[in-house]
Each structure stands twice: as C-alpha cells, then as structure tokens.
C-alpha cells in the first residue's frame, strides 16, 4: 500500500487512490488498514459493505425520509428526489461548474437559467403542474419551493393515513416526471404539454395508491382521487 503519485489520468484509478488514502487515515496506519481489510474477506470475497460502513460519514436521519421512502413511493422516484434534495442532479449550472461550456437556459420554461431551485418549482412549467396537483389533492392555496414543500409534507400528522401517502407519492412522482421531461427535451428533442405531465403523474399515483391501500379503504381512496 505504498503511496503512488496522484498524477494519474484514469479517473477510476484516482478514485481508488482516494479510497485507499481515506482508509489509511481512518484506521491510523497502512498496517492497520491491511489488518482491517483482512477482516473484510469472507469465502475468498471482499465484503465491500464493511469498507463502506467504515468510510461513510455518520449522518443523522433526515426529517423528510418517510416522505421519500414509503410504500406509496416508487423507488426510482425516491432516488431522483434524494439527488434533488442534495443538489446533485446534473443540471446545467452543475455541469458548467464542472467545466462544460453550455448555454444555461431552462428547456421547460425557456425564461430562466436552470438549477435545482428553478426546476422544482420556480419554473413556470413545473409550478403550473404542481399547483394543479395540489388542487387535485385538495391542498389549494399553497405552492412553495420544493424543499419547503417536502419538509411541510414530512411533518404532517397521520403519516400512515392514505392521504399522507397520496401527497408523498404525488410529490415524488412529479419531481421524477419533471426531470424525465427535462431530459426528454434535451436528449430526444421531444416535448410534452403540461397536461400530459399532469395526467401521467395522476395515473402513476392512482395505480400505486390502489395497490398499497388495504381493501377496507379502497372505496375511500377512490372517492378521494375522484372528488378533487
């Protein structure tokens, strides 16, 4: 585990070197790092989750975790929402910071530069969809920034009630659909009207809610979905 020059051109090699250096720093010495790695081998295979558990930073559970990860939310929707909350989606402003020379203009509203806050939901396109969905859920009169909305949803009472699941499913499906629409326009040159995204989110949410709701509440769910 002798230290090697960092002047390597391979990104993957530099990443391995960083992991190596972090492991040495965490364990205290090269010898102790070797000893730790030997405990991670079982059946001739390296158990990488043990290395990950050692290296990851200890973080407390975020307040909005149940609003993003629950039975009414599609996992791929949750993944995109987490990246959006952390500001790690590859928006144009982020790509510019990484050195790419791009014209920073939102492809949805074509009226502002693109970043996380603008996409969710300061953009006229995405805010229009969100306001319509809020009306659909009977939550008229409120429409704020994405992070504020998610924190508000996370602190609502009756988290096991189907209406809480309805809101979380709708929010996460919308964030995913907005990101999907954005990528469709950039990479496929295919645009969809606001109404298309609204109907798509409503369909995804309705199917998911009816799938996870106990049959004893099915009539209530159907009435709620159709009454707003």
Image: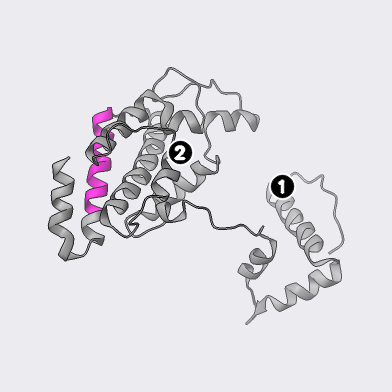
Label 1: element kind: loop
Q: How far apart, in angstroms, are the residues tagged by discs 1 and 2? A: 40 Å
Q: Residue 165, image x and y in percent?
A: 31, 53
As displayed, is residue 120 above or below residue 205?
above
Name of the residue lying farthest toward the front: 157
Quadrant of image for the N terminus? bottom right
Tell me which residue sits at (49%, 41%) in the image: 84
Q: Is residue 35 found left or right of 176 in the rendered image? A: right
Closest to the camera, between mark 1 and mark 2, is 2
Tell me which residue sits at (28%, 38%) in the image: 139
Quadrant of image for the C terminus? top left
The quadrant holding residue 179 is: top left
Q: Is residue 221 found left or right of 168 in the rendered image? A: left
Give the residue at mark 2. 148
The majority secondary structure of the magenta stretch comes to: helix
Tell me which residue sits at (53%, 22%) in the image: 104
Q: Nearer the viewer, residue 80 or 156?
A: 156
Q: Nearer the viewer, residue 142 or 34?
A: 142
Label 2: element kind: helix
Q: Residues within 10 Å of mark 1 (few under 14, many from 20)?
A: few
Give the residue at mark 1. 10
Q: Residue 40, image x and y in percent?
A: 68, 75
Q: Nearer the viewer, residue 2 or 28?
A: 28
Q: Earlier in the sequence, mark 1 or mark 2?
A: 1
Q: Residue 138, image x and y in percent?
A: 23, 40
Name of the residue lying farthest toward the bottom: 43
Which residue range is magenta in the image?
190-208
Q: Can residue 191 be seen in this snapshot?
A: no
């Amino acid at each position: 585990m002798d230290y090697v020059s960092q002047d390597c051109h391979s990104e993957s090699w530099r990443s391995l070197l960083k992991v190596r250096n972090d492991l040495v720093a965490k364990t205290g010495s090269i010898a102790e790092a070797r000893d730790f790695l030997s405990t991670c081998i079982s059946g001739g295979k390296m158990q990488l989750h043990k290395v990950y558990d050692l290296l990851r930073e200890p973080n407390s559970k975020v307040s909005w975790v149940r609003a993003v990860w629950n039975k009414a939310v599609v996992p791929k929707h949750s993944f995109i929402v987490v990246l959006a909350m952390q500001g790690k989606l590859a928006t144009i402003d982020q790509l510019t910071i990484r050195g790419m020379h791009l014209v920073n203009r939102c492809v949805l509203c074509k009226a502002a530069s693109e970043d996380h806050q603008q996409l969710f939901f300061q953009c006229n396109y995405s805010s229009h969809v969100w306001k319509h969905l809020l009306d659909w859920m009977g939550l008229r009169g409120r429409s704020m920034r994405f992070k504020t909305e998610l924190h508000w949803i996370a602190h609502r009472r009756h988290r096991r009630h189907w209406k809480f699941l309805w809101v979380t499913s709708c929010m996460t499906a919308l964030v995913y659909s907005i990101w999907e629409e954005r990528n469709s326009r950039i990479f496929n040159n295919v645009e969809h009207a606001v109404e298309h995204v609204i109907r798509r989110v409503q369909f995804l949410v309705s199917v998911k809610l009816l799938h996870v709701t106990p049959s004893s509440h099915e009539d209530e769910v159907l009435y709620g979905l159709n009454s707003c």
